[in-house]
Image (cartoon, coloured by chain):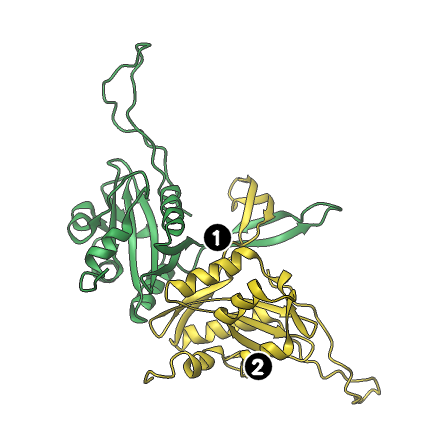
Chain colours: A yellow, B green
Amino acid sequence: MVKYPNLKKPNTGHKSSNGKHFTAYRGMNLEEDLNRSNRYYLETDRAVIYKKPTPIQIVKVDYPRRAAAKIVEAYFQKPSTTDYNGIYRGCYVDFEAKETRVDHFPFQNISDHQVLHLERILRHGGIAFLIIAFTSIEEVYLLDASYFCERYHHSEKKSLSYDAIAKHGHLIPQGYAPRLNYLDILDTYYFKDQTS
Amino acid sequence: MVKYPNLKKPNTGHKSSNGKHFTAYRGMNLEEDLNRSNRYYLETDRAVIYKKPTPIQIVKVDYPRRAAAKIVEAYFQKPSTTDYNGIYRGCYVDFEAKETRVDHFPFQNISDHQVLHLERILRHGGIAFLIIAFTSIEEVYLLDASYFCERYHHSEKKSLSYDAIAKHGHLIPQGYAPRLNYLDILDTYYFKDQTS
């Protein structure tokens, strides 16, 4: 599950008409932004990429008369794979999306299982990456899984710095539709030798 | 959700030592059989294919002290995509698995959304198919989505007969590991021009 704190940006100092401070923060929710982007890609027939449902362990279900089955006891499960996958330009695409409030990405934000999964996808010829959002500055990066997994296993630190992500990743253009145009990054860096 | 009735095969007439009739039925559960097969493919590093979690709409969650969050009201949602996807031999693979007790496959067993999804996958260059289990005779077929979708839209009947599925589909070999060896079908019919 993507946790996405409703961080406020530093106050810009503008004042609204009633004299109160006006906060420029327009809100950002990585999961919702990606879902909107994927819906846009689907509607324009550019790619077929979905977020997988959250895995839930169901313990007890009630079956009321004339009504839908009601789950009355269930628990969240830890996902063993990533949150998103699909197909783009004939290729299998797989990624995990995470946000961080701080100026680095702590490795504890991702599970060993998910790293193992990304490595499997790379080995089988898929495109695998992370999408990392720095919520306090509203920058979102696409970071290839091969770089990330290497650092995850061999870095002495337990995190990746903002600088490393900005250097080795690609800043995702933000707009209205699609909200996060991460497929343009794939076009530029993963399909650069192919004609569109 | 795959419904899989615990059908018993016709009694074979054998008697066990206590004189009672012995039923040869060894049990079959399509979802469990596919999950076992996919686990085997994963462990042998042949493919990375998972069943997506069942989509669930969560209405109410309790957060007891010192215990995991407990979902106390939730409902099953209709999936808009298929149940299974992943990567095999560098290709995006996507399929829906269904069983039927009768000698045909009723189109009402699949949703418009799922057919639309399979068509999208085909258009984007993925491998898309159905796995259909005839539980009463314990035969399981792989049926390409292009044939299925064409029939779904243009057949005058509201179902596909066993004969049509046996003719246009491919019988999946059953064994111990993998339980349902559907990737061998892909090797033979989808990758036949490629060297392994």
Query: Where B116 falls versus A180 (above or below)?
Result: above
Specify few, some or many for label 1: CA neighbours under 10 Å numbering under 14, 14-19, or 20 or more.
some
Q: Which residue is mark 2?
A: A167
Q: Can residue B110 be seen at all in this image of the molecule?
A: no
Specify few, some or many for label 2: CA neighbours under 10 Å numbering under 14, 14-19, or 20 or more.
few
Q: Are marks 2 and 1 on the same chain?
A: no
Residue A28 in the image, given as x and y percentages of width and height: 64, 75
* Residue visible at 53% across and 75% down in the picture: A142
Numbered disc in front, either 2 or 1:
2
Residue sitting nearer the eye, B166 or A43 = B166
Residue A99 in the image, given as x and y percentages of width and height: 62, 69
Question: What residue type is disc 2 on?
Answer: Lys
Q: Can residue B194 be seen at all in this image of the molecule?
A: yes
Query: Where A178 falls versus A34 (above or below)?
Result: below
Left or right position of A40 against B157: right
Residue sitting nearer the eye, B102 or A21 = A21
Residue B126 in the image, given as x and y percentages of width and height: 31, 66
Rendering quarter of residue A93: bottom left
Left or right position of B158 against A9: left
Query: Where A180 falls versus B98 (above or below)?
Result: below
Q: Which residue is mark 1?
A: B53
